[in-house]
Amino acid sequence: MRTVRLVILAFVLGFLVTGLVAPQTHFLWVAIQHGGI
Amino acid sequence: MLATLLSWFRDTGRFLASHPGPLALVVTGLLGGVISGLPVGDAMFTYMWRNPSFCDDCHVHDFANEACFRSVHGGVTTCHDCHKVPVRHYPRNLWVTVFDTPETRSDIPTPHLPLVVCGQCHLSTQEEEPLTGPLTDEDRKHVVKIDDAPLHRAHLDAKQRKPSGYHGGTDQPPRANRSGAEDEPDPTAGAITCLDCHGSDEGEAHQFTATRNDCVSCHGELELPKGHLTTVDCTQCHLEGFLAPERTASATP
């Protein structure tokens, strides 16, 4: 049961990183490059 | 709370380190999540950077959006190819939208676009400038370049914004870049910018076509007080000079 919970947690974390966090940081980086702070 | 969390990480780390099977499953789950999130992240970035709906969520100005879609730029690009704003714009604009919502056109400031933004597509010397919106390289190649058009060249090379008396310059300062932005250049100094002729008046947006009023605002002394030419648009005779790569034989003195 512990393994199942950890697998689910790892999947959710991986999904959040590339699905939500990465596009936001990419957006900010591109915006800073072309528009500044 | 923090101690509990640290304890959980310590126990979980020990458990995974001593059980290779569960560790492999957890790593597989992590990779599965990373891969599953890629299309979602790509769609989110595309929405935020290339889809005008992202900007329109806060910029509720239908007149500007519709004018843009009707213009020559509509259908080939969206906001971010021309409007490159600093990062601080996003939280500030969100705050304004929620707590100080614009009610009329005059509440919406007109942005100032430097020449380089127009030039990245319309000047062959700035073809290497990176685009940030959805305009494709193929479409960019087909955009009209105005470097070698003699009348555009004359305006780009002008040392001052006010034309000479020979060219009908008036004593009035030429109509400035009509953005109203704080960093708007002095209307009587510096080089002519694209928006001097292709910008919009206050309360309008995305009216890119230069009109007779744009010409006579600087070349007022050439405007005839009466006769047929008082109603003729300047571009009916002079348009070719703004587009043709070479001065035509008929226009050569």
Image (tube, helix red, strand yellow):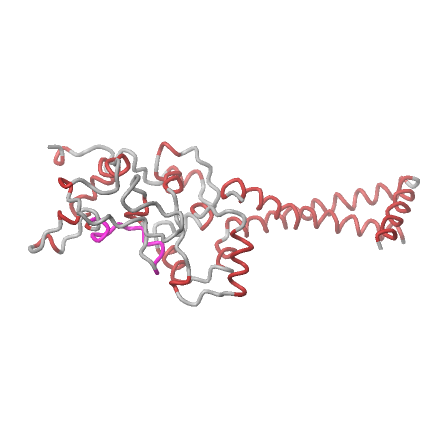
- Residue toward you, B187 or B19: B187
* Residue pictured at 36% horizontal, 58% vertical: B67
* Residue pictured at 82% horizontal, 49% vertical: A7
Q: Is residue B14 left or right of residue B70?
A: right
Which residue is at the far left? B227
Residue B88 % position (x, y):
54, 50
In the rendered image, the quadrant that contains the C terminus of chain B is top left
Bounds of the magenta span? B203-215
What secondary structure do most residues of the magenta stretch adopt? loop
- Residue toward you, B232 or B214: B214
Please check the rendered image and state whether residue B154 is part of the magenta-colored stretch, yes or no: no
- Residue toward you, B179 or B149: B179
Which residue is at the far bottom? B103
The answer to which image quadrant residue B108 occupies is: bottom left
Residue B89 % position (x, y):
51, 52
The answer to which image quadrant residue B136 occupies is: top left
Residue B244 % position (x, y):
23, 37
* Residue pictured at 28% horizontal, 51% vertical: B209
